[in-house]
Image (cartoon, rainbow, N blue to C red):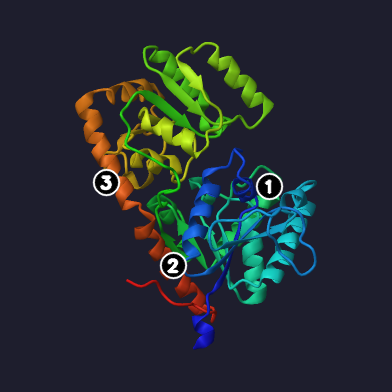
């Protein structure tokens, strides 16, 4: 009984979360933000370690990272993960699996958690099968169904799909992701909408500009944001995000020269981002592919309606009224944005946004994840710890 009540050891593999924990204003994706949120909340009842990219630890030690402290209750372990991925695909894959396995052998987790679309879930499932531990895959985007991982040789996609298929639990962000799974995988899956990131000091918007928050890469379609601004020259548009390559920067600067009503503010820290939401009339999402964007929930918490071209997670826009979903209709972007400058329509959408934000409070969603993780641990004969008091 005492063994089953010990705090289960959970390791979340998140190489790029290193950037967030170093406290630098560097581009991190929504996946990293959500992994950090999950780690912080699971630490209330589990022994949580986040495995990030960094120098190999000295013998007998697994961190901390350059003297940095993680969130309260969360340990940080390091391994040279990103360096391992350099070079030819098969060799890089092997090196990455080896480095993750070495780190996990040191940490001895009961459960390994991967929340990215790369090699992490393959490494997690490999370790779990060899050590009778549990592995969890948390979806990051709708393309996870196909194994479209970080650019690399085609074989890496097959390895990702192997890891996902052998996960003891899949956490889908949306009903659409869940229903896209083969029946055998669906039997070991759950739907858990993204919890709201409560670290941002958000406050209710008073309206103003059209906001775009994302990494500036081609599949986020910044060109469509700029094109919408050109069609609405009397409205102010604000872009927050950093280009991921010199080519992306050149394309952005070229587009900005012909759209004087667009302000590009670069990467925004938490305080600046909260200010941008507080002065936004709507958030515009033009991405080709998404999962459940954290920005949608951040906007909702600030009472900022969302205009989305192709993504409507669990119908929060079309069915719950938190904005406008265009179903891929590029020609309708400008009209949808302009429509939210109508005072009555904007006020109605604001109230719907606040309802959505309340429904995605971590205190409502994380206990569901905790309970499911305990089920998985129990099935593996691993410690389950004490459940959250009701």
**Quadrant of image for the C terminus:** bottom left
Residue 332 point in image, percent of width and height: 35, 23
Who is closer to the viewer here, 302 or 11? 302
Q: Is mark 1 on a helix, strand or loop?
A: helix
Horizontally, is 239 left or right of 277 in the view?
right
The residue that disc 3 covers is 355
> Callout 3: few (<14), some (14-19), or many (20+) C-alpha neighbours within 10 Å?
some
Residue drawn at the location 51% of the way across and 87% of the way down: 2
Task: Tell me the tag on residue 154.
Answer: 1
Q: Which of marks 3 and 1 is nearer the N terminus?
A: 1
Spatial CA distance of label 2 from label 3 is 24 Å
Task: Tell me the tag on residue 163.
Answer: none
Who is closer to the viewer here, 47 or 132? 47
Residue 155 point in image, percent of width and height: 69, 51
Residue drawn at the location 66% of the way across and 66% of the way down: 126
Horizontally, is 25 left or right of 34 in the view?
right
Do the residues bearing badges 3 and 1 touch, measured as CB atoms within 8 Å?
A: no
| Residue 66 seen | yes
> Callout 1: few (<14), some (14-19), or many (20+) C-alpha neighbours within 10 Å?
few
The residue that disc 2 covers is 370
Do the residues bearing badges 2 and 3 touch, measured as CB atoms within 8 Å?
A: no
Q: Is mark 2 on a helix, strand or loop?
A: helix
């Amino acid at each position: 009984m005492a063994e089953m009540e010990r705090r289960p050891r959970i390791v979340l593999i998140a190489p790029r979360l290193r950037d967030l924990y170093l406290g630098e204003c560097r581009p991190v994706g929504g996946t990293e933000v959500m992994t950090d949120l999950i780690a912080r909340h699971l630490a209330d009842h589990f022994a949580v370690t986040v495995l990030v990219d960094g120098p190999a630890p000295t013998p007998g030690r697994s961190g901390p990272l350059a003297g940095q402290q993680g969130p309260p209750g969360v340990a940080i372990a390091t391994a040279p993960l990103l360096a391992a991925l350099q070079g030819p695909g098969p060799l890089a894959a092997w090196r990455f699996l080896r480095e993750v396995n070495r780190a996990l052998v040191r940490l001895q987790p009961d459960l390994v958690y991967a929340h990215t679309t790369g090699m992490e879930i393959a490494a997690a499932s490999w370790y779990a099968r060899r050590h009778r531990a549990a592995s969890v895959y948390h979806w990051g985007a709708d393309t996870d169904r196909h194994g479209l991982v970080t650019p690399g040789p085609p074989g890496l996609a097959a390895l990702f799909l192997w890891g996902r298929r052998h996960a003891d639990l899949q956490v889908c962000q949306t009903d659409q992701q869940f229903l896209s799974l083969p029946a055998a995988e669906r039997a070991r899956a759950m739907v858990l909408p993204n919890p709201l990131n409560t670290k941002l000091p958000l406050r209710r918007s008073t309206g103003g500009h059209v906001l775009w928050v994302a990494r500036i890469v081609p599949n986020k379609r910044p060109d469509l944001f700029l094109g919408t601004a050109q069609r609405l020259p009397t409205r102010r548009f604000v872009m927050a995000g950093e280009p991921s390559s010199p080519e992306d920067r050149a394309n952005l600067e070229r587009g900005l020269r012909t759209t004087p009503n667009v302000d590009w503010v670069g990467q925004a820290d938490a305080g600046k981002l909260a200010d941008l939401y507080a002065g936004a009339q709507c958030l515009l999402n033009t991405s080709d592919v998404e999962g459940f964007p954290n920005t949608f929930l951040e906007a909702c918490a600030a009472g900022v309606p969302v205009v989305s071209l192709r993504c409507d997670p669990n119908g929060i826009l079309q069915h719950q009224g938190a904005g406008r979903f265009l179903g891929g209709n590029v020609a309708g972007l400008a009209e949808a944005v302009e429509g939210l400058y109508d005072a009555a329509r904007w006020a109605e959408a604001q109230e719907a946004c606040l309802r959505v934000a309340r429904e995605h409070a971590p205190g409502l969603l994380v206990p569901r994840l905790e309970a499911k993780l305990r089920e998985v641990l129990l099935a593996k004969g691993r410690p389950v710890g004490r459940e959250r008091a009701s």
